[in-house]
Image (cartoon, grey):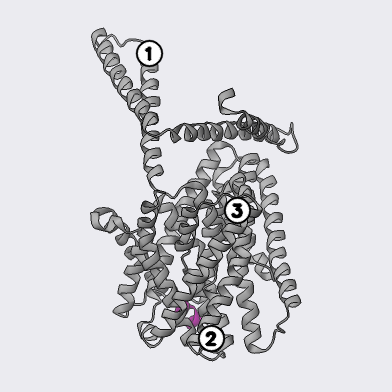
């Protein structure tokens, strides 16, 4: 017993050393990306993949985690953080295209990729279907990290993030079903597939709703920021574990829990200060885990396996790109026709090219049972596809956004918001100077000079803002949207205060939603 305890202690020490090594490499890459101007052109997450590839090339393996452990450690908190920050009104607006992309996009990807590998690469149909299922889901970790780093326009980011968050569950259903089909333990019928899919998704949604609303009402009863912060962390892992144990989708459970807590629980159960604390905590968690997971993606690559399957990898990459185009453009046109989604052609192009694959695809491939034939070739092909999407599509996505003019608005808005911030700051300083008692040790002339200088600066900032409005008329709509968001936040906080005090059982429906709809219905010349 004593020897077992010593061995366990040595194992923990070795794991801790490996973990610290991973952190040191990740932080070194983060520092390099900000210190060297050339590296700033490449998103930080992709630099981590490249660093991991370099370590794999010299056969330095940082850590060896099993695929289920990778999914369990990294996926729940990263999904929760994305869902926590996702605004329900914006998600609700695009729920139809997101749902269609998540379901039918996966079906098109699995079928098209499998057909290409079966017919062109000579791979058996069962193996080709497994590869298709592994690479069918755009990885939320990869996509969200890249889009946030590039500062993609909010609605486009919502479409991509929403699809990525929900199609994981669909891909996992397809993968699980196809593994059973390969072993002959699952009967291939449309009816059984639909039943399994509905059960898998339904359990995930049910668990997410139960945990999300349960914690929302629990946090109403106390105001302890660090306790509430810890509860959200437990809820992320708890929702994933409970749903998986019940035979449902842990991914969907985490997403639903995060959506409810971020849009409902944080409003009725947390004061504004606590919400800020929790949000900053999850931003740190996302940065911390992203720094590790992208490094490990590169570190797990087997170059020998890639070299032996180059032809099949090339066919798989072409099939993934073509089926993604078919899904995005075809289903996008359908959504525009049926639901009036108004997804523009440039947005569809970014959705197509920005459909990165990452840690989820790799974890699914590595989880293929050892008894299945061609397992190593399957893993190599999936790794090859993931590498291409991260290092080719990921690196060129920023250039594509610039060519399509989808990053220019962000630059204008950032400059505009900086000017607004300076104007507000100067006004507050002037207001303080006008109300503060004059310090007898300071000459009155100094106060006057300071006031005059600040007033000149204020006039200069205001002139700059006026010029921005003249050059970019769309900033007016942006200002209106910002004002509406501020007003909605005030309304939500007011209702939440009444709920916390027990004067209301739940928040009433939004008054401002109706006001904004009536306002937008008024013709421009009538305003």
Instruction: Say whether marks 1 and 2 touch (CB < 8 Å).
Output: no
Per the model, the C-alpha gap separating discs 3 and 2 is: 33 Å
Q: Of the two numbered discs 3 and 2 on the same chain, state the one appearing first in sequence.
A: 2
User: What quarter of the picture does the C terminus occupy?
Assistant: top right
Instruction: Say whether marks 3 and 2 touch (CB < 8 Å).
Output: no
Q: Position of residue 45 (x, y in %)?
A: 38, 61
Whether residue 363 appears in this view of the structure is: yes
Q: Residues within 10 Å of mark 3 (few under 14, many from 20)?
A: some
Mark 3, secondary structure of its residue: helix
362 versus 418 height, above or below: below
432 versus 323 height, above or below: above
Q: In the image, which is nearer the foreground, mark 1 or mark 3?
A: 3
Magenta: main secondary structure equals helix
Mark 1, secondary structure of its residue: loop
Residue 510 is inside the magenta segment: no
Range covered by the magenta-colored residues: 2-10
Q: Which mark is residue 436?
A: 1
Q: Residue at x 41, y 42 (%)?
A: 409
Q: Position of residue 372 (x, y in %)?
A: 56, 89
Q: Nearer the viewer, residue 476 or 447?
A: 476
Q: Which mark is residue 118?
A: 2
Q: Which mark is residue 361?
A: none
Q: Is residue 216 left or right of residue 364?
A: right
Q: Which residue is mark 3?
A: 336
Q: In the image, which is nearer the foreground, mark 3 or mark 2?
A: 3
Q: Position of residue 313 (x, y in %)?
A: 43, 80
């Amino acid at each position: 017993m004593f020897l077992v305890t010593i061995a366990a202690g040595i194992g923990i020490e070795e794991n801790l050393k490996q973990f610290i090594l991973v952190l040191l490499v990740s932080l070194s890459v983060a520092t390099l990306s900000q210190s060297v101007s050339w590296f700033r052109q490449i998103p930080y997450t992709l630099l981590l993949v490249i660093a991991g590839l370099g370590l794999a090339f010299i056969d330095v393996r940082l850590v060896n985690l099993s695929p289920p452990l990778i999914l369990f450690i990294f996926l729940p908190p990263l999904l929760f953080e994305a869902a926590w920050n996702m605004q329900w009104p914006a998600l609700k607006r695009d729920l139809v295209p997101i749902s269609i992309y998540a379901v039918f996009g996966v079906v098109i990807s699995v079928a098209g990729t499998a057909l290409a590998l079966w017919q062109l690469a000579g791979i058996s149909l069962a193996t080709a279907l497994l590869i298709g299922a592994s690479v069918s889901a755009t990885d939320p970790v990869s996509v969200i990290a890249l889009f946030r780093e590039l500062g993609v326009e909010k609605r486009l980011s919502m479409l991509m993030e929403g699809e990525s968050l929900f199609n994981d569950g669909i891909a996992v259903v397809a993968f699980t079903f196809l593994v059973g089909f390969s072993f002959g333990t699952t009967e291939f019928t449309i009816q059984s597939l639909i039943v399994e899919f509905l059960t898998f998704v339904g359990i995930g949604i049910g668990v997410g709703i139960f945990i999300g609303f349960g914690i929302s009402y629990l946090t109403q009863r106390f105001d302890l920021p660090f306790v509430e912060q810890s509860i959200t962390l437990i809820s992320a892992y708890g929702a994933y574990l409970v749903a998986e144990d019940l035979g449902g989708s842990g991914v969907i459970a985490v997403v639903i829990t995060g959506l409810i807590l971020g849009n409902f629980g944080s409003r009725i159960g947390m004061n504004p200060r606590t919400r800020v604390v929790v949000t900053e905590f999850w931003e740190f968690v996302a940065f911390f885990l992203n720094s590790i997971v992208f490094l490990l993606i590169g570190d797990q690559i087997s170059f020998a396996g890639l070299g032996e399957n180059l032809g099949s990898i090339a066919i798989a990459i072409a099939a993934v790109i073509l089926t993604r185009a078919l899904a995005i453009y075809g289903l996008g046109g359908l959504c525009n026709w049926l639901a009036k989604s108004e997804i523009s052609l440039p947005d569809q192009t970014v959705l197509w090219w920005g459909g990165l694959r990452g840690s989820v695809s790799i974890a699914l491939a590595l989880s293929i049972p050892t008894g299945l034939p061609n397992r190593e070739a399957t893993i190599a092909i999936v790794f090859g596809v993931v590498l291409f999407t991260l290092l080719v599509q990921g690196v060129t996505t920023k250039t594509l956004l610039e060519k399509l003019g989808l990053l220019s608005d962000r630059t204008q808005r950032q400059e505009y918001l900086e000017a607004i911030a300076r104007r507000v700051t100067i006004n507050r300083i002037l207001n303080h100077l006008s109300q503060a008692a004059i310090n007898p040790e300071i000459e009155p002339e100094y106060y006057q000079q300071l006031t005059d200088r600040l007033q000149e600066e204020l006039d200069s900032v205001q002139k700059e803002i006026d010029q921005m409005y003249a050059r970019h008329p769309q900033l007016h709509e942006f200002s209106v949207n910002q004002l509406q968001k501020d007003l909605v936040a005030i309304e939500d906080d007011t209702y939440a205060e009444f709920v916390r005090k027990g004067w209301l059982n739940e928040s009433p429906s939004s008054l401002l939603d109706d006001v904004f709809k009536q306002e937008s219905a008024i013709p421009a010349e009538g305003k």
